[in-house]
Image (cartoon, rainbow, N blue to C red):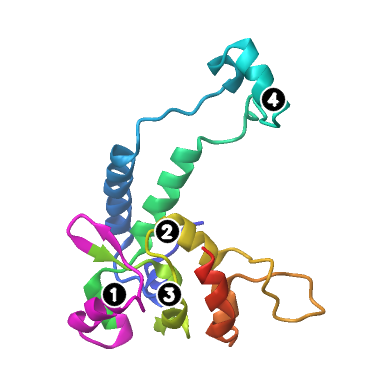
Amino acid sequence: MELTEKELRDRGIRRNREEIEDDARRFAFRVVASLPTGRWVTEPAREFSPEEAAVLEEGGLDLSPPAEEEPDPLARTAARYAAMLATALTTREAAGLLGTGESRVRQRLKEKTLYGVKAGRENRFPAFQFEGGGEVPGVGEVLRHVDRSLHPVALANWFTLPTPELYLDEEEERAVSPREWLLSGGGPRVLVPLAEEL
């Protein structure tokens, strides 16, 4: 699916597609270059002697090769990270969206009521915390309780993927994401204990 520049602006993204694609390439390069040099093993059992493999399997470790369609987890995380940074707002863009000055955005970053990721020398503010022309209601209260050592992709996934503890309607069996919970008018205090467990 390709978004038009109008659709990007409607989502609070103030850069054109070419700039985003260029950023994505640069960020993917930086992310991949900074990843540890560990390797994705396609046949785990071959990494151990037969005796070691037997002991590990007895202990419940699955040493069977991953399914063909399973992508390299490091590459998958790097791609998600690059995509997150490519759609993130700069300090100036976040200030414009929030109707405040850049210094206030930096102050909120220090107060932990906005979430930012360092990209080179500047901060980028992932899009999951914004909606339309402003921020997701109550997101600052939730972010204050998130451990900042949590990987950015893990945090973005938590905010945007359904959480089994969250339902908008008890009769409806569809779980919602913390982001959807807040956008629907759900209180941030419900999310605080979940955020503290991350």
Q: CA distance from mark 2 to mark 3?
A: 12 Å
Q: Are marks 2 and 3 in contact (CB under 8 Å)?
A: no
Q: Nearer the viewer, residue 177 or 187?
A: 187
Q: Give the mark nearest the N terminus, 2 or 4.
A: 4
The structure residue drawn at horizontal position 32% and vertical position 81%, both measured from the top left corner, is 97
The residue pinned by badge 1 equals: 109
Q: Looking at the picture, which amino acid does disc 1 mark?
A: Leu
Q: Residues within 10 Å of mark 1 (few under 14, many from 20)?
A: some
* Earlier residue among tags 1 and 3: 1
Residues shaded magenta: 97-122
Vertical placement of residue 188 versus 47, above or below: below
Quick one: SS at disc 3? helix
The Cα–Cα distance between marks 2 and 1, rounded to whole angstroms, is 15 Å
Q: Does residue 45 appear in the picture of this structure?
A: yes
- Tell me the CA gap for discs 3 and 4: 40 Å
Q: Earlier in the sequence, mark 2 or mark 3?
A: 3
Residue 168 position in % (x across, y down): 70, 80
Q: Is residue 12 above or below residue 149?
A: below
Q: Secondary structure at mark 4?
A: helix
Mark 4 residue type: Glu
Mark 3 or mark 4, earlier in chain: 4
Q: Position of residue 195 (x, y in %)?
A: 51, 70
Q: Nearer the viewer, mark 1 or mark 4?
A: 4
Looking at the image, residue 121 sits to the left or right of residue 74; the answer is: left
Q: Which residue is mark 4?
A: 57
Q: Amino acid at mark 3?
A: Leu
Residue that label 3 marks: 143
Which residue is pictured at 22% across the width and 75% down the height? 92
- Residue 94 seen from this side: no
Of mark 1 and mark 4, the one earlier in the sequence is: 4
Q: Which mark is residue 150?
A: 2
- Are dots 1 and 4 in contact, CB under 8 Å? no
